[in-house]
Image (tube, rainbow, N blue to C red):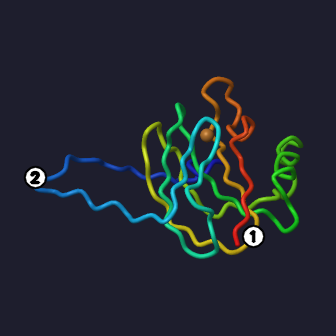
Amino acid sequence: MLHVAKGMSHRLVVTTASAGAVAAPEPKADVTITLADYSFTTSTPLTAGTHTIRVENSGAQLHELTIERLAPGKTVADFRQWVAGGMRGMPPVEPVGGFAGLDTGRHGWVTITLTPGNYLLNCYVPDAKDGKPHFVHGMVEQITVR
Ligand SMILES: [Cu+2]
């Protein structure tokens, strides 16, 4: 059952800023990951430890950054095989963080702590043209964190 059907929703009211309000300064990022149709570009390799990642969408479509830790011995090929098999059984990855639903030309930040291992940078957003998840179009990349 969808979580929203179990009550996982909340009303949010957005109001105009009060006079004299100042925008908060942007967080300081040590890594930038740029999303495009259909790739990830990382400014510097992600290493073990805590990072504040600036996530930018330079693509023509909405994208997301999902960071998933691969199970020991698993690779992006195992992920593709699991998807091709209808996503049955234990997934070869576990989500550890990311940034969802970033529109064209927008940016945001995510702070994440990584331990050494193999990860996927992944995008599950349905494609605007064929509705298939972007990872089907190649928007999934395996990285090694040391
Ligand atoms: Cu995408």
**Residue at the top extreme, as displayed:** 129
3 vs 88, nearest the viewer: 88
Instruction: Give the percent coordinates (x, y) of residue 17.
Output: 19, 50
For this view, does 117 lie left or right of residue 65?
right
> Looking at the picture, does residue 145 appear above or below residue 4?
below
- Ligand 1 is within 8 Å of the C-beta of the residue at disc 1: no
Mark linked to residue 71: none
In which of the image's four quarters is ligand 1 placed?
top right
Label 1 neighbour load within 10 Å: few <14, some 14-19, many 20+: some
Disc 2 marks which amino acid? Ala
Determine which residue is flagged by label 2: 19
Q: Seen from this angle, which residue lies furthest left? A: 19
Query: What residue is rendered at 60% in x and 27% in y?
Result: 128
Q: Position of residue 42 (x, y in %)?
A: 59, 54
Residue topped by disc 1: 117
Residue at 50% in and 52% down: 55
Count the marks: how many?
A: 2
Residue at 86% across, 50% down: 77
